[in-house]
Image (cartoon, rainbow, N blue to C red):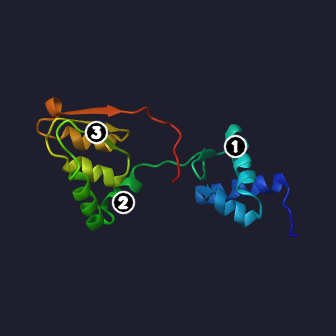
Amino acid sequence: MGFVMSAALRVSHILKEVSNAGQVSATELAEELNVSVETIRRDLKKLDEREELVRVHGGAICKAYKDEGASFNKRASNNIQEKKIIVGKALAHVYEGAIIGLDASSSSWHVAQAIPDIKCTIVTNSLNNVVALAGKKIYLSSISVVSTQINTKPFMG
């Protein structure tokens, strides 16, 4: 059996890693520290409760972390050809009266831009999608946008 790190040393290591990298993965921390993912999740929960970091899906981020949109803009311009294929396939299922759900991904944003001016309902949690849909010629009479509740805690996926 290998070295077992104390909880205090583990927490100190986690805080150092999240401070240096801006974000950490629970799975990677568990492998690195030779503990279970559940142990890391408990540590992250305690640190989040003490407001020393922010727990997110799959790990944690530094309290000072700010996503200022660069990541979305970068993703939106990556893999354009593949996204055009996705858009084409998605639009094949769009019809008048449809109820369409669009998440906050850059691929969904491309779909939102390409949706034809037809009467349908769009359900989205993305301000980028709302802005893309607002540019439609007959937006007010043909597309209803329903925004879901905004979660103020970011997530890492």
Q: Tell me where residue 45 sits by quadrant.
A: top right
Verify CB contact (< 8 Å) between mark 2 and mark 1: no
Q: Is residue 29 above or below residue 62?
A: below
Question: Nearest the camera: 117 or 50?
Answer: 117
User: Residue 153 appears at what percent x and percent y?
Assistant: 53, 40
Asked whether, in this view, residue 60 is left or right of residue 37, the answer is left
Q: Tell me the residue at 88%/69% (across/down).
A: 1
Is disc 3 surrounded by few (<14), some (14 to 19) or many (20+) residues within 10 Å? many
Q: Tell me the residue at 29%/66% (across/down).
A: 82
What residue sits right under mark 3 in the picture? 130
User: Residue 119 appears at what percent x and percent y?
Assistant: 16, 35
What residue sits right under mark 1 in the picture? 45
User: Residue 80 appears at what percent x and percent y?
Assistant: 28, 64
- Secondary structure under tag 2 reads helix
Cα–Cα gap, marks 2 and 3: 19 Å
Q: Tell me the residue at 82%/52% (across/down).
A: 7
Is disc 1 surrounded by few (<14), some (14 to 19) or many (20+) residues within 10 Å? some
Q: In this view, does 106 lie above or below 151?
A: below
- Secondary structure under tag 1 reads helix
Looking at the image, is mark 2 or mark 3 nearer the viewer?
Answer: 3
Q: Tell me where residue 83 sits by quadrant.
A: bottom left
User: Looking at the image, which residue sits at the far bottom?
Assistant: 2
Cα–Cα gap, marks 2 and 1: 31 Å
Query: What's the amino acid at mark 3?
Result: Val
Query: What's the amino acid at mark 2?
Result: Lys
User: Looking at the image, which residue sits at the far top?
Assistant: 141
What residue sits right under mark 2 in the picture? 74
Query: What's the amino acid at mark 1?
Result: Lys
Asked whether, in this view, residue 28 is left or right of residue 87, the answer is right
| Sequence order check, earlier mark of 1 and 3 | 1
